[in-house]
Image (cartoon, rainbow, N blue to C red):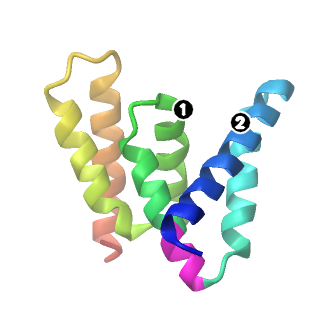
Amino acid sequence: MTFEEFRAEMDAYWQSAKEEADSFKDPYIVLERLRALYAKLDSGERTMADRVIAEWALEGDEGHRSYALTLIEDLRIGHAVPSLRALAERLAHSTELGASFWVNRATKIADDLAKQGRS
């Protein structure tokens, strides 16, 4: 499977989980389903999943961003540190509502992963 195909499958999986979460009014369903999916992946698939999750962190959609940052932190995805730093840099001078929250959150997660030697 190519990375593009894998990304499309992860995006579809996220969308399905999001629709289920919305129908039950329970946002944690998305995280539960994504964590369960991640646990089933082999090492090659996890590498691709790490890349997809890092991409989600950079998206403008706060939903994707929020789930991505939580997954990066919980799953200790060290390869996402450059994306977290890029997100913090991009939003550091932004007038977007909540930008400072995202800068602080991304920076904290990146710093914690770096301290653990995961970057």
Q: Is residue 110 above or below residue 118?
A: above
Q: Residue at x 20, y 37 (%)?
A: 90
Q: Is residue 111 visible?
A: no
Nearer the observer, 5 or 14: 5
Residue 40 percent across, percent down from the top left: 73, 74
Magenta range is 43-48
Mark before the other along the chain sequence, 1 or 2: 2
Amino acid under label 2?
A: Lys
**Disc 1 designates what residue?**
63
Extreme-bottom residue of the structure = 43
Amino acid under label 1?
A: Gly
Residue 14 percent across, percent down from the top left: 66, 46
Extreme-right residue of the structure = 24
Per the rendering, the mark at residue 115 is none
Residue 64 shown left or right of residue 42 in the figure: left
Residue 45 percent across, percent down from the top left: 59, 76
Asked if the residue under mark 2 is in contact with the one under mark 1, i.e. CB atoms within 8 Å, the reply is yes
**Residue 44: in magenta span:** yes
Residue 6 falls in image quadrant: bottom right
**Residue 73: in magenta span:** no
**For numbered disc 2, what is the local secondary structure?**
helix
Q: CA distance from mark 1 to mark 2?
A: 9 Å
Q: Is residue 97 above or below residue 24?
A: above
Q: Is residue 89 visible?
A: yes
Residue 74 percent across, percent down from the top left: 55, 59
Q: Residue at x 46, y 30 (%)?
A: 61
**Disc 2 designates what residue?**
18
